Amino acid sequence: MEDSPALSFASQTLFTSHGQKPLNLLVMVGFIALFAYVTVSGLMFVNDPQRTRHLIVALAIPIPWISSPFLVYRFATGFHAVLGIASPEGMFGIKLEASALLGSSFLFALGQDNPWSMGINVFALVMLILLHRSIQMPGPAAPPPTAASVEPHSPEVPGLNL
């Protein structure tokens, strides 16, 4: 299994966090738990494709990308392709944004001077839709009986063998 760079960074920072604020450590532990949850939900699905509930949650977690002066939340595992809108710095209006990354990452901030933006991890959304469709698809239907395969039914009479 390959280590994700974000998980490696988070765990390295956690274990060398002398003098870190408790809130920073709590955020690190929270994101390590999210990475672990995503990994475990994928392993559960690989072992039993009927166990999709945790995989649905794991695919939904990285869909929203939010940035504001109050809160920043970004979480990606494996790959992300994000489309979003943002406010240009120092100007009024809206600009379109797009980004993609092969690898894992997270960003969480509270009360910092970040620009307004909202985005959707399109890759995670598409994967969630495909999973949902595969769950909703009925299995292959049995073919209708043909005349050759239908045998006349004769009632059985106890003690009478014909």
Image: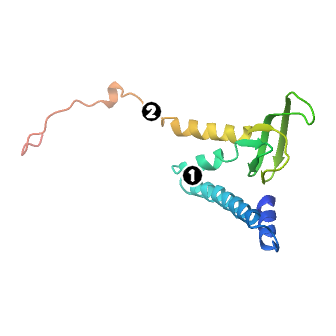
Determine whether, in the image, residue 139 is placed left or right of residue 128: left
Q: Amino acid at mark 1?
A: His
Residue 58, position in %: x, y? Answer: 63, 50
Q: Which residue is mark 1?
A: 54
Instruction: Please give the name of the residue rendered at 70% of the width and 46% of the height, measured from the top-left corner.
Output: 62
Q: Is residue 138 above or below residue 44?
A: above
Toward which corner of the image does residue 11 lie, by quadrant? bottom right
Give the quadrant of the C terminus.
top left
Foreground mark, 1 or 2, reads 1
Instruction: Please give the name of the residue rendered at 85% of the width and 35% of the height, measured from the top-left corner.
Output: 97
Q: Is residue 1 visible?
A: no
Residue 41, position in %: x, y? Answer: 60, 55
Question: Marks 1/2: CA distance?
Answer: 28 Å
Secondary structure of the residue carrying tag 1 is helix
Instruction: Please give the name of the residue rendered at 70% of the width and 42% of the height, measured from the top-left corner.
Output: 63
Q: Which residue is mark 2?
A: 141
Q: Nearer the viewer, residue 129 or 86?
A: 86
Secondary structure of the residue carrying tag 2 is loop
Toward which corner of the image does residue 156 lie, by quadrant? top left
Q: Amino acid at mark 2?
A: Ala
Q: Is residue 95 above or below residue 49?
A: above
In this view, the residue farthest toward the top is: 147
| Tag 1 near tag 2, CB within 8 Å | no
Residue 158, position in %: x, y? Answer: 7, 44
Give the quadrant of the N terminus.
bottom right
Q: Is residue 92 visible?
A: yes
Residue 55, position in %: x, y? Answer: 60, 50
Q: Nearer the viewer, residue 21 or 73?
A: 21
Q: Is residue 4 above or below residue 56?
A: below
Can you tell which mark lies on residue 67? none
